[in-house]
Amino acid sequence: MSVDCVVVDPDLGVLMVRRKNPPFKGQLALPGGFVDIGETVEQAAKRELKEETALEATDLTLVGVYSKPDRDPRGHSCSVAYLARTRNTNAIAGDDAEAVAWIKDLDGIEIAFDHRDIITDALNLIR
């Protein structure tokens, strides 16, 4: 099981990481990763966000559960996605993120996994 975090700035820019590792190495993705044994999905979402972007989530809102069998080329993996709120937007790439960026216009950009669907659902929650 994995988690993904959608962080949105006041201008509706979405925080994305450039993946350092396969699959989808070099592509943009949401901050996230696998849930560790003994960890809740909420704890995992906060941990992954901090490890990959140095941002601390102050609040999590469930966006949805994403479970298409082909969403991850490594095998069938279910992801719980959250809209995460933070106190600041000074993101710094860490862990398995090669870089971080706030992306406002996602048109024409290759996005890893099914993260475009997750972003669409999260932005619909905000609007």
Image: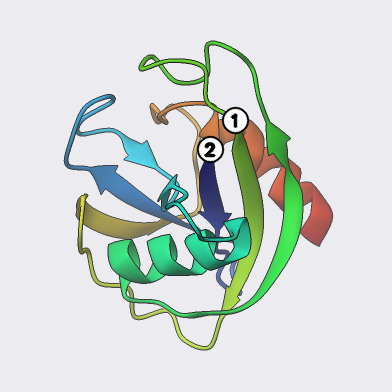
* Identity of the residue drawn at 64% across and 39% down: 118
Frontmost residue, 33 versus 9 = 33
The Cα atoms of the two marked residues, 1 and 2, are separated by: 5 Å
Frontmost residue, 13 versus 16 = 16
- Using the image, determine if residue 24 lies above or below residue 91: above
* Identity of the residue drawn at 65% across and 24% down: 67
* Identity of the residue drawn at 61% across and 64% down: 42
Question: Which residue is labeled 2 in the image?
Answer: 1
- The mark total stands at 2
Residue farthest to the bottom, as pictured: 87
Q: Quadrant of the C terminus?
A: bottom right
Query: Badges 1 and 2: C-beta atoms under 8 Å apart?
Result: yes
Query: Which numbered dot is residue 106?
Result: none
Residue 127 visible at all: no
Residue farthest to the front, as pictured: 38
Q: How is the image coloured?
A: rainbow
Disc on the earlier residue, 1 or 2: 2
Frontmost residue, 111 versus 35 = 35
Instruction: Give the residue type that dot 1 points to.
Output: Cys
x%, y% of residue 44?
A: 49, 60
- Using the image, determine if residue 111 lies above or below residue 125: above
Q: Residues within 10 Å of mark 1 (few under 14, many from 20)?
A: some
Question: Which residue is labeled 1 in the image?
Answer: 78
Asked which secondary structure carries label 2, the reply is: loop
Residue 49 visible at all: yes
Q: Quadrant of residue 79?
A: top right
x%, y% of residue 24?
A: 28, 26
- Using the image, determine if residue 22 lies above or below residue 2: above
x%, y% of residue 85?
A: 61, 75
